[in-house]
Image (cartoon, rainbow, N blue to C red):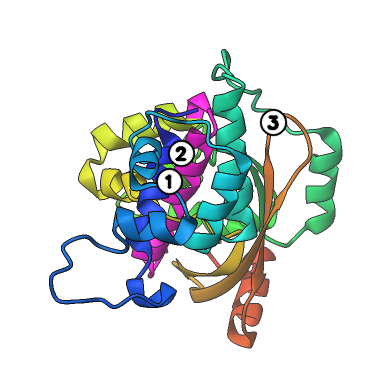
Amino acid sequence: MAENALGAFLRSRREAISPTAVGLPVGTRRRTPGLRREELAALAGISVEYLTRLERGRDRRPSAQVVGALADALGLTPDERVHVHRMVKTADAQVCPQATPPPRTVRPTVLALLDRLEPTPALVVDPQYDVLACTAGFRRLAGPVGLLDGDEPNLVRFTFADARARAAFPDWEGVADERAAALRAAADLGDRAATALAEELSITVGTEFGHRYAGAAVLPAWAGVEQWEHPTAGLLRLAFESLPLPGPEEQRLIIHLPADAATQAALTLVTNGTLVGS
């Protein structure tokens, strides 16, 4: 697990919650964003001293009762509760990070599933968002914007390190937040490749990535709508679903679907190869 991942997660969630959301007055002398430590401790029924130890990493193995109380006080979603539980169990078992990176291979049955999904834009990614396999429909969507350039395309690296990403994603700020949160979630659970990519981007990109990564207060959305600007099809509103694939590799299948009628018509032309440049 990443250094003090649990404490950083608890602190970021505390600082992201408005006092009014839990029935507390805002006041005029509040210097801390979100909740103060003493406020969260009172809501969770634990001491301020113990919460401080958790946030600073001096205690990384809280009991299930404490975790549950903090989750209730912070209003964590079911996915966030599972994530916290996994961080605690990783620390409790003293699990060493992966000695070797997982293989960049996709099971034949998953590849066959991708074939069945054609021409829908779909891809398989690993925890650090390397693109391991994709449909021809996704290549026609993502290739023209530059996302698949290089031998080992990566969604996070493209978003932050490639200038074309800002044109490809009109809501670049929101996409960047999601990508940083996804990488942080993987690194916090001990994924060495995710940690290495985060270190790389912290150096090569700088604070624009680093601030988002350090301040990731929520888990990434596994479903939603993204806007893509395709060079020939124009603006596309794409709904996405991110589905975990069983197995030790922790790969995900991401499927993109049109979110409105205009996108449906344009995406059909793109994925069928009708539009020039797609």
Q: Is residue 16 above or below residue 243?
A: below
> What amino acid type is highlighted by mark number 3?
Glu
- Relative horizontal placement of residue 121, taking residue 168 as reference (left or right): right
Q: Which residue is mark 2?
A: 6
Q: CA distance from mark 3 to mark 1?
A: 24 Å
Q: Quadrant of the C terminus?
A: bottom right
Residue 147 visible in the picture: no
Identify the residue at the far bottom of this view. Answer: 261
Residue 92 visible in the picture: yes
> What amino acid type is highlighted by mark number 1?
Phe
Q: Residues within 10 Å of mark 2 (few under 14, many from 20)?
A: many
Q: Which residues are magenta?
A: 168-193
Q: Which residue is mark 3?
A: 249
Q: Is residue 186 magenta?
A: yes
Which of pointers 2 and 3 lies earlier in the amino acid sequence? 2
Coordinates of residue 58 in the picture (x, y in percent)? 37, 28
Q: CA distance from mark 2 to mark 3?
A: 23 Å
Residue drawn at x 14%, y 76% as measured from the top left: 28
